[in-house]
Amino acid sequence: MRTEAYKRLNGRLETPLLITGEGRVLTETMAIALWLEARDPERRITFEPGTPEADRLHQYVAFLNTGFTGAFTPLWVALEAEEASEEERETLRKFGRGFVAKRHEQLEAMIGDGNYLLGDKPTLADAVFAGVARWVDFHEAVNPHDYPRILALRQRIEADPAFRFALAIEDGKPAIGSGAMKGLIPLADVLRETSAALAA
Ligand SMILES: N[C@@H](CCC(=O)N[C@@H](CS)C(=O)NCC(=O)O)C(=O)O
C-alpha cells in the first residue's frame, strides 16, 4: 500500500479504496458506504434513504468510523512511531486504552435488544463494526467481557459464514463462498491497470 502506484489512487495512503466498474476511484469509508447504499435497491444491507432507519444506520456508521475508530489512534502510534521512546509509547498506550474504553462504554449503551446494531438483520453498520472491533484483540486494549453486548454482537457476526469467508480470503486460505465474489486480483495488477486507465 505504501507505494507510489497506490499514492496515485489515494494520496493519503489509506484503505479502504473502491474502484468502481467504470474505473472511478472512491476513498473514505463513509463515501463507500453511501455508494453501496445507492446500489442496494433491495435493501439487503441498508434502508431506504430518508427513513428513520437509514438515519440511524448513518449515525452508527459515522460513530464507528470517527469516535470508535479514532480511539485506537494512540495505540497505533505507540506501535508504529519509530522515533518514540518507551516512556512516550507507554503514555500513548495509556491514553489509547482510556479512549477505547470510553467508546466501548458508549457503544455498549447504544446497542439495543436486537441481534444486530439495527434490529434483526446484519447491515453495513455491522460490517463497519466487525472490521474495527477486532482491533481490541490485537492491542489488548480492553477486557471484552466488560462489554457483554459488544462481545455478543462480535461473536454473532464472526460466526456468520459471510464473515468467515471474508476472513479466510483476507488470510489467503481456501474458502467456499456464496459465489458473489467473482475473484481475487493481486494488488499489483489492480494498481497497474487502474493507473494506466487513469493516465489514458
Ligand atoms: N477517514 C478514512 C480513514 C481510513 C483509515 O484510517 N485507514 C487506515 C486503516 S483502517 C489506514 O489505511 N491507515 C494507514 C496506515 O496506518 O498506514 C476513512 O474513513 O476511510
Image: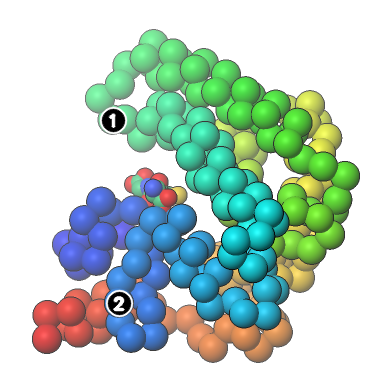
Cα separation between marks 1 and 2: 35 Å
Q: Residue furthest left?
A: 200
Residue type at numbered disc 1: Glu
Which residue of the protein is positioned furthest toward the front in this rendering? Answer: 50
193 left or right of 14 in image = left
Mark 2 is surrounded, within 10 Å at the Cα level, by few (under 14), some (14 to 19) or many (20 or more) other residues, namely: few
Find residue 119 and report its horizontal and vertical position in percent: 81, 55
**Tag 2 secondary structure:** loop
Confirm or reject: label 1 Cβ below 8 Å from ligand 1. Answer: no
Other-residue count near label 1 (Cα within 10 Å), few / some / many at <14 / 14–19 / ≥20: few
Answer with mark 1 or mark 2, whichever residue precedes in sequence.
Answer: 2
Q: Residue furthest right?
A: 113
Q: Which mark is residue 131?
A: none
The C terminus sits in image quarter: bottom left
Near-viewer residue (171 or 55): 55
- Based on the displayed image, in which of its 4 quarters is residue 17 positioned? bottom left
- For image coordinates 65% across by 50% down, the residue present is 56
> Residue 135: x, y in percent?
58, 42
Q: Residue at x 60, y 61 (%)?
A: 50
Residue 24 tag number: 2
Image position of 159 with respect to 72: above or below: below
Numbered disc in front, either 1 or 2: 2
Q: Tell me the kind of residue under disc 2.
A: Arg
Q: x, y percentage for residue 76?
A: 43, 34
Residue at the image position 38 percent from the left and 30 percent from the top: 77
From this view, report whether residue 81 is shown above or below residue 123. above
Does residue 57 appear in the picture of this structure? no
Q: What residue does disc 1 label?
A: 82
Say whether residue 41 is visible: yes
